[in-house]
Amino acid sequence: MALFSTAYWAPVSAYLLAAQSDVVEIEQHERYRKQSYRNRCTILSANGPLSLVVPVLRPHDSRIRDIRIDYSKPWQKIHWRAIEAAYRSSPFFDEFNGDVRQVYGKEIPFLFDLNIKVWEVSQALLRVSFRWGFTERFVPPPPPATQLHDYRYVIHPKAKRKPEGIALEPYFQVFGHKFGFVPDLSVLDLLFNEGQMS
């Protein structure tokens, strides 16, 4: 079993680890952590890596399941425009943009629920099926000797090292000619650039 934090268009490494696991559990009882993939993703724009952040209300010391999204800002429109600008010339944008865009079609009150919707859409587009569920209570990270693979705090935008067992092979990226290959971006980057070969 592998344990993951909830994530907004998680990086490729999270999907690779999930695909290698028999069962995936998503943490729903931890306290919200700022500056993590819980409410952000990174795409490759014409100006380089770009973080897209979902604004949230009162995040301090709240359970992740209870974090509300701040719709006072037009973040959905901003995110979609950034995604469209970054990937409209990618090989598979026309094939996948409708499925991705529908995520931005209505206001989902809670961040956790938005991330579950994103997880379901990306899993369908990847054409891979993980057995997954949710944690029943918060459990602190276990000692390394156990069978549980805990990735809740390992897959992080500021992490210098990737989890063991991750080999991220280069693939075509629209702006690769400008920046070289940028590894472990959002799964959106892999989907729009590689399509069914993802």
Image (cartoon, rainbow, N blue to C red):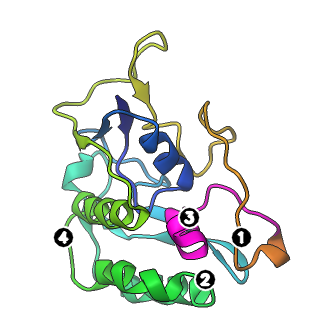
Q: In which quarter of the image is residue 72?
A: bottom left
Amino acid type of disc 4? Pro
Name the foreground residue: 194 vs 7: 194
Q: Is residue 51 visible?
A: no
CA separation in Å, label 4 and label 1: 35 Å
Q: Which mark is residue 197?
A: 3
Tag 2's secondary structure? loop
Q: Is residue 195 visible?
A: yes
Q: Mark 3 touching mark 4, by CB under 8 A?
A: no
Q: Name the residue rendered at 53%, 56% in the picture.
A: 11
Residue assigned mark 4:
109
Indicate which disc, 2 or 4, sits on the residue closer to the N terminus: 2
Examine the structure image and report whether residue 161 is included in the region drawn in magenta: no
Amino acid type of disc 1? Phe
Q: Mark 2 touching mark 1, by CB under 8 A?
A: yes
Q: Name the residue rendered at 43%, 62% in the picture.
A: 126
Q: Give the range drawn in magenta.
A: 180-198
Q: Looking at the image, is 65 positioned above or below residue 160?
A: below
Q: Quadrant of residue 111?
A: bottom left
CA separation in Å, label 2 and label 4: 33 Å
Tag 1's secondary structure? loop
